[in-house]
Image (cartoon, rainbow, N blue to C red):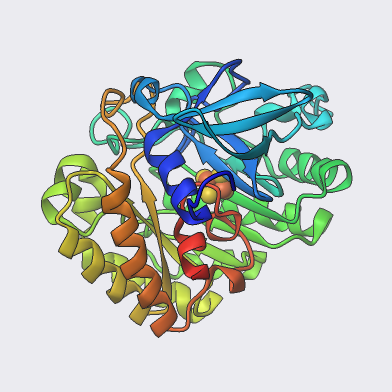
Amino acid sequence: MGTDLKLREVVNDLQCLGVKILKPLSARRGGAGPAEGQVIIFKGIPVSCPVASAFVKDSPYVIERNGAGHILKKYEVDIGEVTFPSTPRFYQRKTADGIPYSQIAIIHGIECLASTVFQRCLNWQTSRCGFCGIELSLASGYTIPLKLPHQLAEVAEAAVRENGVTHITLTTGTQGDEINAFRHLASCVKAIKEKTGLPVHLQFMPPQDLNLLHLLKDAGVDTAGIHIESFDCRVLTEVCPAKARIGIKRYQECWKVAVDLFGRNQVSSFVIAGLGEDRHSLIEGSEMLCDRGVYPYILPLRPIPGTPFSSSAPPDPEYLSSVYQDVASLLSRYHLSWRAVKAGCVRCGSCSAITRFEEN
Ligand code: SF4
């Protein structure tokens, strides 16, 4: 590296401050959970960085052309070369029923295929999570409202063959009829597994009937994401009213069933830093997760244009660095690691620096 910056500090900085790219490439503008980002590959690892939000103009980081390649600079000082993942060829193709593959699933990071199975959410009109852009992608025409099992299997097969993807992430908006929703999710997972055999990660809200998790296990789900987002009750009530109504007790019951089914270290929860939370709640909540065998996937708020957080900024990198250090110590103490995770966001690691903080 051109300076004495550590890799983990650069990744954390890039995700908190964003990076100016002199010639913007195509970037995600919506999606479920964290979105609005451009993946860059730096020192061999994929890093999803904000590039389009207002705060990015103040970032000291810039990516410039450097001969045939690109270089990352901080305050005009060279940090190192970066590359961009190439656009997958399969994005140009259409399913047998005429849907562009790119509207069914896209590559996240460098080797994860990701899709939002239900692109609408029951809570969108009245009590959506303030940071989420799930229906914005739909409105922009980048995707379709519902992905079918055979469509996902067809795209997954092409992504394995042409791009060497090694795992799959499926997420979903919340549906009113949870039995039918879980059956559909299970069918999607089964179809993908039958076609590719790849490990599949599925993200969902705790259902009223926790027995529905058995459907997912039987379908072949390998890892589960059950995301509380914040352990600060005030923040959760304000930002994620639907999750606050479910309540922490129900999340704990769901995590327990999930860990019993999928195993320690194979269940995770997003914990977002930068929502105005009390730091103590974040650390205490992360320890509670670790104690239950659940991986706390700490990640910075990613303000998505078009959401209530669009004019917010991610947290201060120093604050997040101190959080990462404390949570990495917890992960070590409870013998949890991203390295053991079979599929999903924790394995991909593009949206958080926690994996880098685990390393030292
Ligand atoms: S960490 Fe998750 S949301 Fe982020 S790019 Fe990877 S799979 Fe997608």
Residue at image point 48% right, 47% down = 10
Residue 166 in percent (x, y) is at: 75, 56
28 left or right of 111 in image: left
Residue 99 in percent (x, y) is at: 74, 24
272 left or right of 64 in image: left
Query: Is residue 203 in sight in this rendering?
Result: no
Q: Nearer the viewer, residue 183 or 216?
A: 216
Residue at image point 66% right, 37% down = 82
13 left or right of 285 in image: right
Furthest residue toward right: 161
Residue 53 in percent (x, y) is at: 39, 23
The image quadrant that residue 55 belongs to is top left
The image quadrant that residue 246 belongs to is bottom left
Query: Is residue 231 in sight in this rendering?
Result: yes
Tag count in the figure? 0
Residue 144 in percent (x, y) is at: 59, 26
312 left or right of 48 in image: left
The image quadrant that residue 226 belongs to is bottom left
Residue at image point 82% right, 43% down = 163
Q: Nearer the viewer, residue 79 or 57?
A: 79
Depicted 260 relative to depicted 61: above or below = below
Depicted 87 relative to depicted 241: above or below = above
